[in-house]
Every structure is written in structure tokens, then in C-alpha cells.
Image (tube, rainbow, N blue to C red):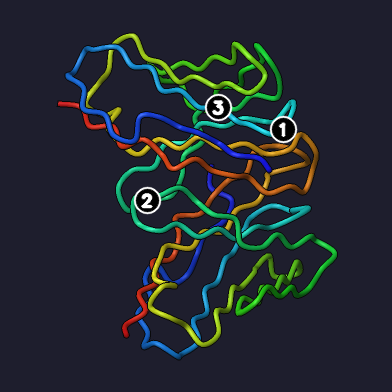
Amino acid sequence: SQTIHQWPATLVQPVGSPLSLECTVEGTSNPNLYWYRQAAGRGLQLLFYSVGIGQISSEVPQNLSASRPQDRQFILSSKKLLLSDSGFYLCAWSPGTQNQPQHFGDGTRLSIL
Amino acid sequence: SQQGEEDPQALSIQEGENATMNCSYKTSINNLQWYRQNSGRGLVHLILIRSNEREKHSGRLRVTLDTSKKSSSLLITASRAADTASYFCASPLSGNTPLVFGKGTRLSVIA
């Protein structure tokens, strides 16, 4: 069966520090991968998605970036965090075909001080 | 951009009652999905209903889809305290594009 791992679960970072959140998927090949951010009590905002290694689509211009160095690895990064980057970050995967559900990791709670 | 919008934003019911949540969307879809999120956790997929389907069941969950009204509903029958969570609808804007989620309905089931 497929599993998705996302870490760390919580992270407290100072403003201006770098960020690296990692997400890996097991048990499937060539998945679509997604990074979302969720503000407190709000819906999900799609940040990046990828349909293959090295293929990244950015939905929202900001100081975050994403990379997919391996088929089942998706990394969210920032060189300098802003206060507004605080939130709940969720990684998800889906099979690369239409009409398929997405499967989410447990999320990372990021607090910027 | 926002595709789906859930209604109501919050719902509080007694255990054993039925809970109905609605979702309206803007563009034509090929499927609509419902997800559940417990506080501080990731989303869990509940049901996917395709545009050519009108109703789908899974255990105590029933989802309907009315493409003419661009709306869907999620019914949870005989609710339990463990059903307390936020529920989201989502659909792709087109084809195999990523899902766009609504803001969710916060359901509280009181024992």
C-alpha cells in the first residue's frame, strides 16, 4: 500500500531563516505531488504541484520554492522566511491520471517568530 | 481561485442526528471530492463522485451531485462525536489539473 511521509511535524523558525520541508511517498511510481498551505481555520491554498521529476508548477508567487529531485520526493524551501509564511503545510500525492483522489501527509505546523 | 464553497461554515448537532453539508462550485467539473480533516491533521479522502453520477454512498456517508445547479451535498447519518471535524469539497478546474478546495464546514457533534 502507498504511504506518504512528511516531516517535521512542527517547526519554529526565526524571520529571515531558511526552510526545508520534505515529503516522500512510498508504494507508487510517478505520482503527482502537491504542496498546500492552510491558514488557521481556512481552506487549502495550492502552492506547488509536480507531475514528474524536475517539473514544478507554481500557483502563487512568493518567496517559497519547490523541488522534486527524485520521483517520490518533494521538497518545499525558502531562503528567507517571512512572518506571513506561518501556517500549516500539507504535502499530498495522487496517481497521474484523471478522477483520482489525493492522499495527504500529516502536515507541518510552521511558526515564524 | 476558489472552485468550491461549502455551506454552512459551521454546524453543531447532537449525536445521533444527521448532518448535511453543501458545496457549490463555479465551473464544469469531471468529478467532485469530499475530504475530512481532524484538527491539526492532514485531509482524508471520503468520496469521489464523477460528473455522470448523481448519488454515491459509503457507510454512513451519502453524497449527491447536481451538475445543473453546480452543487453537491454530503450527508452523514446517525452522527457520532468522532465525526467532529472539518469537511471540504474539492474539484479540478479542468481535466487533470490539481484540486481546488473550498474553505470547509466545521462540524461539531455533541455527545
Whether tag 1 and tag 3 are in contact, CB under 8 A, the answer is no
Indicate whether B35 appears above or below B54. above
Q: What's the amino acid at mark 2?
A: Arg
Q: Does dot 2 land on a helix, a strand or a loop?
A: loop
Is the residue B43 above or below the residue A19 in the image?
below
* N-term-proximal mark, 3 vs 2: 3
- What residue do we see at 43% from left, 81% from top? B80
* Chain of the residue that carries numbered disc 3 in the rendered image: A
The picture places residue A9, in percent across and down from the top left corner, at 34, 35
Residue B73 drawn at (x, y percent): 61, 73
Q: Residue B106, how many percent across, how many down?
A: 38, 66
Q: Which residue is mark 2?
A: A42
Amino acid type for the residue under numbered disc 3: Thr
The mark that comes first in sequence, 1 or 2, is 1
Which residue is painted at 22% across and 32% down in the image?
A111
Q: What separation in Å lies between label 3 and label 2 (alpha carbons)?
A: 25 Å
Q: The disc numbered 1 marks a residue on which chain?
A: A
Q: Which mark is residue A24?
A: 3
In-front residue for pair A81/A76: A76
Identify the chain of the residue marked 2, using the numbered disc in the image: A
